[in-house]
Amino acid sequence: MPDDLQQKKPGQLLARGVCRHLNTLDFTSVEELIPAPGLRVDVMALGPKGEVWVIECKSSRADFVTDAKWQGYLDWCDRYFWAVDEDFPSDLLPTETGLIIADAYDAEIIRMGPESRLAPARRKVMVHKFARHAARRWQAARDPGFTGTVSL
């Protein structure tokens, strides 16, 4: 595994593979977006028709069992997914949510999450947050020493 990947945590490796796969579906994605105070999604994806998907990456049983916030993410997306590796006991995951099997290099959607379309006003807010988050990340990548923005 390349050095830059060895420094990432298991959930970050899952997120990497998920983002790579979503790109093949013409979705663009960002990691660690805050849709509302107290919530931080692992991956938020924006589709070619404005679809908003949230993907939570779980690297272990303990990581899933201790997650008490996931249902709060449902109000901020059109579809919700769990992303886990192939060894994760996926029978723990609620069947009314989507399922993605991933590793650091790719992913596969096993089960689509049911669609629950965002209201237009909420969609506008999420697309705006997505764009600002992506722009801030790009600025930080281009100019790591710049301190004129709010930290992520």
Image: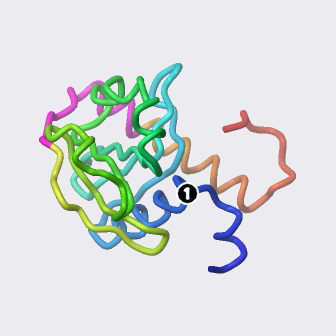
* Position above or below: 14 against 25: above
Position of the C terminus by quadrant: top right
The residue at 36%/62% (across/down) is: 87
- Is residue 126 magenta-colored? yes
What is the x, y in percent for residue 19?
A: 42, 62
Q: Which residues are the magenta region?
A: 114-127
Left or right: residue 118 versus residue 46 is left
Spot occupied by residue 76 in the image (x, y as percentages of width and height): 32, 30
| Residue at the extreme top of the image, as rendered | 37
At 24% from the left edge and 52% from the top edge, which residue is drawn?
99
Residue under circle 1?
A: 10
Give coordinates of residue 69: x percent, y percent.
41, 24
Instruction: Indicate the amino acid at tag 1.
Output: Pro
Front-most of 128 and 16? 16
Asked if residue 151 lies in the magenta stretch, the reply is no
Q: Secondary structure at mark 1?
A: helix
